Amino acid sequence: MAESFPNFLLHEASPALPAAGTALVVALEGKGKPDQIIVRGAYRVDPDHRAELGPGPVRPRVWLLAAGTDLRVEWKAAPGYDAVVFADEESPDGPLTGYFNVVLGDCLRMPAALVGTVHLLALLGPLRSEPVAMVFG
């Protein structure tokens, strides 16, 4: 069965989280136009950092930001903004781990005819992933 997007499941191509500590990571799968690239991300929030994010579900607060260095334009979106988070999926004050898988072009509404270098990173409260560079065109 084909994978549907967006989804919030651990995938065999999900980026690995560090062995311990709060972390946010992203990886790209595929090449070509933005609608041919899948962004896979993972995050872990330790109890010490959970309070920094405030009450409520964390999944809707993960943002993707893409900045075109040649184009001087940016795109941003929250992959899980309208995703349902069930009570047993995220601890309100304990540790939590989550994943996201989205099609880059669909999530960020990037044009198919994009040309130039774009850097992508994920944001979650004060957390920031390492940027990932993509070259289009």
Image (cartoon, grey):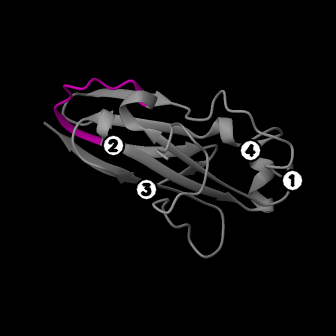
Task: Say few, some or many: other residues with alpha carbon within 10 Å of mark 3 (under 14 / 14 to 19 / 20 or more).
Answer: some
Q: Looking at the figure, which quarter contains the C terminus? A: top left
Q: Residue at x 56, y 55 (%)?
A: 42
- Give the SS element for disc 2: loop
Part of the protein shown in magenta? 108-118
Can you tell which of label 3 and label 2 is closer to the viewer? 2
Q: Looking at the picture, tell me which residue is in the foreground, 27 or 2.
A: 2
- Give the SS element for disc 3: loop
Is residue 113 in the magenta section? yes
Marks 4 and 1, how far apart at CA: 10 Å
Q: Earlier in the sequence, mark 4 or mark 3?
A: 4
Residue type highlighted by circle 2? Ile
- Residue of label 3: 130
Residue type highlighted by circle 3? Glu
Q: Which mark is residue 37?
A: 2
Task: Kindly give the residue lying farthest to the bottom in the view shown.
Answer: 19
The answer to which image quadrant residue 103 occupies is top left
- Residue of label 1: 93
Task: Kindly give the residue lying farthest to the front in the view shown.
Answer: 1
- Give the SS element for disc 4: helix
- Residue of label 4: 53
Marks 3 and 2, how far apart at CA: 18 Å
Marks 1 and 3, how far apart at CA: 26 Å
